[in-house]
Image: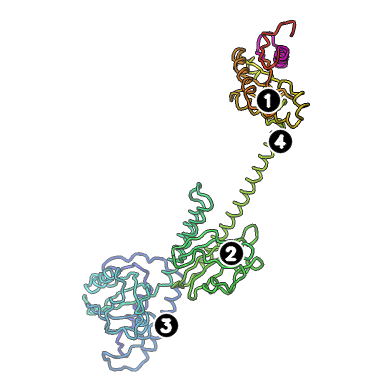
Amino acid sequence: MPRLPFSPSFILSAALLATVPCGAQAKKGTTPRAAAPTSLPLLIGAALGGLALGGALGFALRKPAAPKTSGEADPLFDDAPFPLALIDSNEKIGRANSAFSHFVGVQNATGQVFSQWLHPDDLARVRALCSEVFSGSSAQSSGENRFFRADGALVHAALSIRKQGQKREPDTVLLGLQDVTARVEAQNELSGARTAIGALYEVIAGDKSRDLDAKIKSLLAMGCGRFELPVGVLGRFAGEDFETLFVQSADRRIRPALTFARADTDSSEARLLGLSQLPTRGNWRDFPIVAVNAGHAYLGAPVAVEGELFGMLSFSGLEARPKPLGDESGALLQLMAQWVGGEIEREEARRALETQQLALVEANQKLEMLATHDPLTGAKNRRAFNDKLAEEWSRAVRYGTPLSLVLMDVDKFKSYNDTFGHPAGDEVLKKVARTLMAAVRTTDFFARYGGEEFVLVLPNTDADGAMILADRLRQKIEGASWKERAVTASMGVASLTGDIKDAAALTQAADDALYQSKKNGRNRVTHVRDVPRVAV
């Protein structure tokens, strides 16, 4: 049997070192813990590696014996598909296979210092693992660490360290590496995606008091951070132009928005971003994602509202990203664009509903105005007066509170119309109404009774109070400035007493008092209590 520089058991153990789960360590004299579950690709890789090593080992055993020298080739070590190296206590590599040299990115790693490729933050931990094996306190140590290749690229590897031979304190230890960069990056992407989804949910369902504008601004800021692009834009297609609605820009070298025409891919902005084709209203469904990462970076997705193209949600920058955007970034952007479109649709529906509600309120107000107001003077009309008088009568009778009514008439209004014309007469009525409405109390109710007559309902007002107020109103009319000739008014006052049985009787009493004012010379106020019973 030829003697190999590395025993079959050593080579086989080296093959298995590369598949040791991260963080597992076998301490001398301790019972190994159950191995953590390993992913299916990792198991398949380990099985294929074992088969390859078995074939290489069988081939080596059939080789004729050869003299052992320090530079003697060993196919099982040199041609192993995973990185292997022997290092001494000074971290110098005594021997490294081609897979190890390729992993660290050099022509030949033999003779170099192993620690030069370790991430500074992992250096102390790896030295502690090596120390355990060199001191004999552990036959094997392992852990997941970061390395910098010769070209500066950061890679991740599961590192296993195993002693050589039977010596308690070996002169060299065997290092085995398994490249786990793809898995770590996938985990980071998954973690980043979860973080992004959480941030998106926070924007969507966070502070309920924020309006849509504030949410979209937060969404753009979140997207800039997630996609590592300095400019976020939400814009809409307005005719042939692209109208910018919101801009999030941390790069002041870029014109705020990076806008472009809908169909003009020859625009300066489109050329700047390297965009050769952009969505249109006819084909936007064929462009769920527009991505460019050549010289400049651009990632955009169309925003649809009610099944039609509304605009674009995009993120961009002047430089290309060091790492191209993956499918998960496109999926997240589509989710963001769908949310924006749905929110805009709901906002437009809400505004349309508000517009309809306002129009309905205005229409109801107009109907109410027509039903309860006099179109000429703007005062309440006879119908509104009847309703108010019935309400105040019922309240006064129930609670025993005073109630008075003033009925007034513009003096000699017919002759004024005959002399100066109906338009001039209408102006008199409007001015009388304005004068009285400005002078009455907020608790009083003023209305046009009909023709040149007006009426005033005075809740919680007795006969004396009603007379004082009525005379003050009479003086207001008499003292006003009139264009054609002086205008005065006669007034009749009635108050609730035991012999007045209903609201109609109260109105009739005020009319009797008004008749007495006219009979006694006009431009005066008369209370029904002062009217002779014979006259009534």
Task: Mark 1 or mark 4: name the one nearer the start of the chain.
Answer: 4
Q: Is residue 502 visible?
A: no
Q: Position of residue 73 (x, y in %)?
A: 32, 90
Contact (CB < 8 A) between labels 2 and 1? Answer: no
State which region is magenta.
493-520
Outermost residue on the right side: it is: 418
19 and 197: which is toward the camera: 197
- Quadrant for residue 422, please give it: top right
Question: What SS does tag 2 mark?
Answer: strand
Q: Which residue is mark 1?
A: 447
Which residue is located at x 27 percent, y 84 percent? 111
Q: Amino acid at mark 4?
A: Leu
Question: What SS does tag 4 mark?
Answer: helix
Q: Is residue 370 visible?
A: yes
Q: Which mark is residue 242?
A: 2
Q: Which residue is mark 4?
A: 367
Q: Residues within 10 Å of mark 3 (few under 14, many from 20)?
A: some
Q: Is residue 108 left or right of residue 417?
A: left
Task: Mark 2 or mark 3: name the one nearer the start of the chain.
Answer: 3
Q: Which residue is mark 3?
A: 52
Magenta stretch: includes residue 505: yes
Residue 281 versus residue 426 in the image, above or below? below
